[in-house]
Image: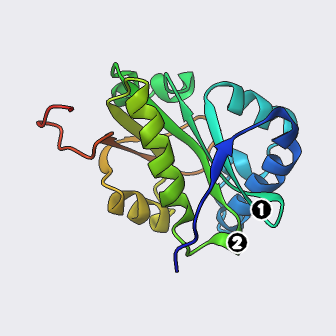
Amino acid sequence: MTTHVEARRYRPEDASELTALLNTAYRQLQDQGLNFTAATQDVETTRQRVAAGVCWVVEHDGCVAASMTMSVPAPEEIRSLSEHAREPGTGWLCQVAVGPELRGRSVAKALFDVVCEWAIAHGITRIGLDTAAPAEHLVTMYTRWGFAHVDDVHFPGKNYDSVVMTRGVLNQRDDEPSR
């Protein structure tokens, strides 16, 4: 089932609700033993991470229930670990979250489509992301979205390796020119 998504830009007053969403959305991964920052981050960390990019949210029943942030350039931490995050024209997806009440309804993909439209309008040609290698359901989802696994990294303080994935904004292969 697909849900119609009306994404809007994050507003400062969303910080507490967004933090609660991130904590809830990443709890399943924490329960699997993966120490994702989003599973336990506080409101100040949310504000800092959102300030490093452009964040969109989706409301459900009047509450923030999904979000996605695009950072341009990629956060310094990933740029220091992967050359793919340093490529010119690359935006980085960060803290993608969908609350349990909206999962399985293509909400994350609809948000990603909004992010791609923004990226095209702002001259971004590639999109990258990183996620925990053991989170196979996330790697599978991003692969369905056209991302390719291009690197492996290990963030300091994390108890898992991460995969780095990239794709063209228009989902073109690396050897195809952007339109």
Is residue 153 at all visible to an observer of this figure? no
Q: Secondary structure at mark 2?
A: helix
| Pick the front one: 155 or 115 | 115
| Pick the front one: 87 or 106 | 106
Residue of label 2: 100
Mark closer to the observer (2, 1):
2
Tell me if residue 33 comes above or below residue 177 in the rendering: below
| Residue 164 in picture, x, y percent from top left | 40, 43
Residue of label 1: 24
Q: Amino acid at mark 2?
A: Pro
The mark nearer the N terminus, 2 or 1, is 1
| Residue 67 in picture, x, y percent from top left | 65, 50
| Residue 77 in picture, x, y percent from top left | 55, 26
**Circles 2 and 1: CB distance less than 8 Å?**
yes
| Residue 91 in picture, x, y percent from top left | 44, 30
**80 displayed left or right of 23:** left
Q: How many marks?
A: 2
Q: Residue 150 bears which disc, if any?
A: none
